[in-house]
Image (tube, rainbow, N blue to C red):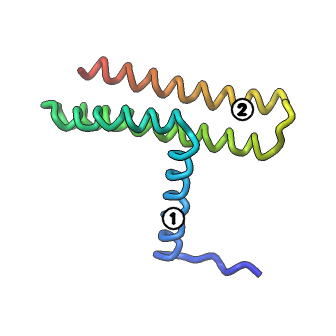
Amino acid sequence: MRNPPSTGAGRLLRATGHSWRGLVDTWRSEAAFRQELLLAAPLLVLVFALDLAPLSRALLLATLGLVLVVELLNTAIEAVVDRVGADWHALSGKAKDAGSAAVTVSLLVHAAVWICVL
C-alpha cells in the first residue's frame, strides 16, 4: 500500500531529491546538457563581471537558465518516447523533433538577447 502523500517540508525534501536525481542523470547521460552547462559557466562569470544594469543582468541570466530548462524537458520527452518502445512511429519522431526544435529556439533566443544586451 502507498504511503499517504506528504505535505510541507517532507514533500519539499522529496521533490528536491527527485530534482537532484534528474540533474545528475541528465548530466551523466546527455552530452548536449553537459556542453550547455559547461558553456554557461564562463557566461555566468561574465554576467557578473560586466557593468550591467540589473534588468540586463537578469535577462542574460534568464536566457542561460532557459536553455538548460529546455534541454532538461527535451531529455524528458526523449526518455518517455524511448520508454514507449523502440519501434519507429511518426508521433515519436514528431515529439523528438519538436523537443530538439525547442532547444534550438531557446539557443537562438539566448544568442539574440546576449547580442542585444552586449
Tell which of 10 and 86 is nearer to you.
86
Disc 1 element: helix
The quarter holding residue 60 reads: top left
The amino acid sitting under disc 1 is: Gly
Choose mark 1 or mark 2, whichever is in front. Answer: 1
> What residue is drawn where x is 48% and y is 28%?
106
Q: Quadrant of the N terminus?
A: bottom right
Q: Quadrant of the C terminus?
A: top left
Taking 107 as reference, is 5 above or below it?
A: below
Taking 9 as reference, is 75 above or below it?
A: above
Q: Residue 86 at what x, y percent from top left? A: 83, 38
Q: Answer left or right for 65 relative to 55.
A: right
- Label 1 belongs to which residue? 17
> What residue is drawn where x is 43% and y is 24%?
109
The amino acid sitting under disc 2 is: Ala
The quarter holding residue 80 reads: top right
Tell me whether the residue at label 1 lies in contact with that at label 2, contact meaning CB atoms closer than 8 angstroms: no
Q: Residue 97 at what x, y percent from top left? A: 68, 26
Disc 2 element: helix
Tally of marks? 2
Q: Residue 93 at what x, y percent from top left? A: 76, 28
Q: Residues within 10 Å of mark 2 (few under 14, many from 20)?
A: some
> What residue is drawn where x is 54% and y is 42%?
72
The quarter holding residue 43 reads: top left
Q: Residue furthest left?
A: 51
Q: Answer left or right for 53 relative to 59.
A: left
Tell which of 97 and 29 is nearer to you.
29
Q: Residues within 10 Å of mark 1 (few under 14, many from 20)?
A: few
Q: CA distance from mark 1 to mark 2?
A: 27 Å
As drawn, the label of residue 95 is: 2
